[in-house]
Amino acid sequence: SPPMNRTICLSLGLLALASAFTGHMPMSRPTIRSSPLMMGKAKDGPFTPAVLAAKVVLGEQRLLKWRGKAISIHSQAINAFCLDYGVSKKMNQALIKKAKFVGADLGFLS
């Protein structure tokens, strides 16, 4: 539906804008972990107030659904980029993992 598409586009635009304010650190080698990675409590970031307001306006279930769709679209964009430029699957997964941590630091997972 048009309002949903508009919302997804706005969300992706905000993500793109937020990337301009994050530091670009060199990728480190992934460490091998014996247990699954747990995120714990969501961090507060510059977008936490917007996410909390969206949770009130949309409801938690709808917010989770839209956030899941936005994460899926972002992961697909990373996959397409890596495929277009011949990036290894290992680096591709590292980029997706990095996006998850940056999103958490910015407060998108609040």
Image: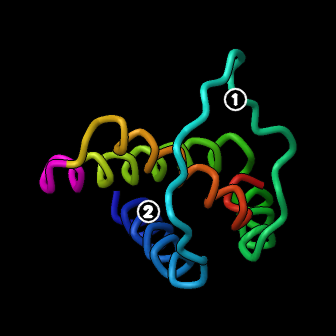
Query: Where's residue 50, x and y in %?
Result: 73, 72
Amino acid type assigned to the residue bearing label 2 in the image: Ile
Q: Is residue 73 left or right of residue 51?
A: left
Residue at (39, 69) in percent of width and height: 9
What whole-number distance in Å separates the C-alpha atoms at marks 1 and 2? 27 Å
Q: Nearer the viewer, residue 56 or 95?
A: 95
Q: Tell me the magenta residue range.
A: 80-86
Q: Amino acid at mark 1?
A: Leu
Q: Is residue 52 above or below residue 71?
A: below
**Is residue 85 magenta-colored?**
yes
Q: Can you give x and y, in whole percent of width and height, for residue 70 in the image? A: 46, 53
Residue at label 1? 37
Give the mark, 1 or 2, whose residue is nearer the N terminus. 2
Q: Quadrant of the C terminus?
A: bottom right
- The reply to whether the magenta stretch includes residue 79 is no
Q: Which is more toward the observer, 21 or 14?
A: 21
- As helix, strand or loop, the secondary structure at mark 1 comes to loop
Q: Residue at x 38, y 47 (%)?
A: 75
